[in-house]
Image (cartoon, rainbow, N blue to C red):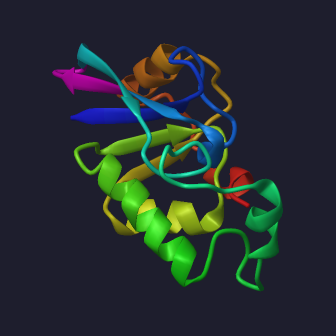
Amino acid sequence: MKIALVTMEGRTISQHYGRSPYYVIYTVENKEIVGQELRRRGTGHFAPDVQTNEQNHEEHDNSQGHGFGSDADKKHASMAQEIGDCKVLVAGMMGRGAYQAFTSAGIEVVMTDFEGVQDAAEAYIRGELKNLADERTH
């Protein structure tokens, strides 16, 4: 099983999924971490092939909430494909559209207030990582 955690630098969990440039991917076997990878995100605000600014990001808001619409759906599907080999995605917060895209792709999304990526991954493995998704999706 693989667990993806969004991060700015590889050590701490990013509090805003869309602004994090990397994933730390842990490979888990028999409840033990057996591998680690730092994977650059190819989609989102920091993607090398996408020019996005906060003003445009906010202008696309609609009555469904943050991150909906055909353009957003395509971006979210690409995001889910990037970590399609992972069972779980851990983040601080994310938009409701991204959350729905990941869960629709069969990826469990866990929102947390943990700071350290390894601490959060180990808590998930032990079954002790509380999911704060109801209060941390916007």
Q: Quadrant of residue 107?
A: bottom left
Apparent side of residue 45 relative to residue 61 in the rendered image (left or right):
left
Q: Residue 4's x, y, as percent?
A: 39, 35
Q: Residue at 37%, 57% (x, y): give it.
A: 80
Quadrant placement of the C terminus: bottom right
Screen quadrant of the N terminus = top left
Magenta range: 25-31
Q: Examine the image and state in which quarter residue 134 appears.
A: bottom right
Left or right: where does residue 124 sit relative to residue 85? right
Residue 136 seen in the current view: yes
Q: How many marks do you count on the picture? A: 0
Q: Is residue 29 magenta?
A: yes
| The one of 74 and 107 positioned closer to us in this rendering | 74
Work out whether residue 15 or residue 132 is closer to the camera in this orientation and state it: 15
Q: Is residue 19 above or below residue 38?
A: below
Question: Residue 126 location in percent, x, y?
Answer: 38, 23
Tell which of 77 and 1 is nearer to you.
77
Q: Position of residue 19 (x, y in %)?
A: 65, 42
Find residue 15 and report its horizontal and vertical position in percent. 69, 36
Q: Is any part of residue 132 visible from this angle? A: no
